[in-house]
Amino acid sequence: MINLDSLLSDIEKPSRYIGNEHNVVIKDWDKVQLRVVLAFPDLYEIGMSHLGFQIIYHLLNRREDTLCERVFAPGIDLEKKLRNRRIPLFTLETKKPINIFDWIAFSLSYELTYSGILTILNLARIPIFSRERDENYPLIIAGGPVVLNPEPIADYFDIIFIGEAEEALDEIIDVYLKWKKKENRRKIELFENLSQITGVYIPLLYDPIYEGNKFIGLNPKYSWVPRKVTRRVVYDLDKAFFPTKPIVPLQQIVHNRGSVEIMRGCQRNCRFCFAGYIYRPKRYREIDTVIRYVEEVFKNTGYEEITLLSLSSSDYPKIEELITRLVDKFSHYYVNFSLPSLRADNFSLGLAERIERVRKSSLTFAIESGSERLRRVINKGLKEEDFLDTLEIAFQKGWNNIKLYFMLGLPTETEEDIEQTIELIYKILGINKKARLHLSFSVFIPKPHTPFQWEKFEDREVIERRRSMIVKALRKKNVNLDFHNYSMSYLEAIFSRGDRRISKVLWKAWEKGSRFEAWSEYLNLDLWEQVFEVNNINVNAYLKEKKIEEALPWDHIFCGVTKNYLLKERERAYRGIETGSCEWRASCDFCGVIHGEKYNI
């Protein structure tokens, strides 16, 4: 038994590891058939902020024959202690070593957490590469949005699930339990059965093909292996499982509030947006369902703030009715509701005013560029005149704190576009000299399954020059500038478009001590550059513009949107032609995603 007091006595934030939070689920080990560890390859405060992690945890635990416990990547201090004392990594719920479970299922939401996968497996004394694990080891599984290009981490996993798990998990469990009962079970037999389930990708069943240093494609090893793996979609979101007794952390986490998902998918067609393409089609929960979930989450957690989650909250049907009913029902409890993604228009402003009757905060808009030309290229669909009118009304109503999100390095971007962004900020300050602006600039990353998946990732020198233009022009007391770390975006771009050769690089960098690349204080880019060079990896091959006919590492994954549609959107981008929103029950632009009336689509 682990002496937790001794182990955590001089560890930073021991609350990351002790468990025993409100709404935690602990089951009898001997009364279940399947024992799962749900792993998140980053620190506790990051993993516990992800709704998807909570959904999978409670989705598994709702089954009487299954238990699910949690593990997170330990901080560097605890990792050292575990190694020095030769203690295997353990779960939060019962402190059992994770290598005695049937599955270790990783929830992956960000490419820069990949080294955490290796930390968790190594501390559990489990071989890193799937080819080195036989039937005696736990099944290592991955899911989450980033696995829509699974190749950079494919060599680590037995199974990678593509898509939304609410319906597919039961199918996978049933197949696994049937296999587990056999006396002479072989992994290949399990793989053959699982590979027939929509959304299941088994990397060991495919051989990557290269010509020199050029990726050519993947070849299935057996006739029964599907050439393409299709993303699994939960079409009826209103009836899909949702956890209304989420675990309430003992410590402060990144998003320390309740969450209710009101809609999945987006109709805006922003050409850079990975989530906007991989979560198609748009689906929503009925108003009465949302209100019931909010009531249950509030009752079961006591959270004073609840976020109504979606990619484009103001596009939810009858959003005004939903907000009115929620605020009327919960205002006397002083519950604050937030909408994380609003359009920069007067309609959204009205929603914000209504929803913040309890507590007034700031307004946040993602406008991506101050250049109207560039916004047409990326299909943002925002006119400067309309946006300034919206802000003028916002200032009149008492909102003086405005946060704006921008991108640098977008396709076709020039320094003239940067100058127009600067001019837009001066126009805003001209409307209200007392306005306090927080401007956040990220670097554009060409993501798989989007119209910009073929674009280049911009050079550091170009981004730095444009950053300097902005800093020099906007040195004002009431303007706060925040620039995302270029080195982090650089690595993310490589991982986003990588093939299986990246897995070896990840492993070598991890062996040399690389950890927590998503945390700027830990990122050591020099180490990564050395490892790329030693392993003969041409980084530019992943960062440069790709030819249309070039094989892409994720071509065997079908997210629902056809490549022809993406190419058409790319052509429209370069011609500066906008594509209209995918309106509810309106004409279809034939992107390839399956629609259906019975699914409220």
Image: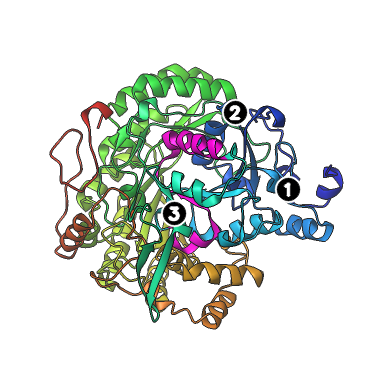
Please report the residue visible at 70 percent of the width from the left and 53 percent of the height from the top: 124
SS state under label 2: loop
Residue denoted by label 3: 146
482, above or below 366, in the image? below
Which range of residues does the magenta coloring cover? 150-179
Residue 403's spot in the image, x, y percent?
A: 41, 50
Disc on res. 65: 2
Residue 444 visible in the picture: no
Image quarter of residue 444: bottom left
Q: Is residue 480 left or right of residue 573?
A: right
Mark 1 vs mark 3: give the one in front. 3
Q: Out of 534 and 200, give the one closest to the viewer.
A: 200
Is residue 199 magenta-colored? no
Question: Quadrant of the rendered structure where residue 526 is?
Answer: bottom right
Q: Quadrant of residue 219?
A: bottom left
Label 3: which secondary element: helix
Does the segment drawn in magenta span residue 168? yes
In the rendered structure, which disc, 1 or 3, sits on the residue that comes first in sequence?
1
The residue under label 1 is: 13
Relative placement, left or right, of 116 versus 536 is right
Amino acid type, mark 3: Val
Separation of residues labelled 2 and 3 (CA atoms)? 29 Å
Q: Main secondary structure of the magenta part?
A: helix
Question: Looking at the image, which is closer to me, 348 or 150?
Answer: 150
Instruction: Tell me, yes or no, if residue 508 can be seen here.
Output: yes
Which quadrant does the C terminus fall into? top left
Within-10-Å neighbours for mark 2: few <14, some 14–19, many 20+: some
Residue at x-position 33% and y-position 66%: 552
- Give amino acid for label 1: Lys
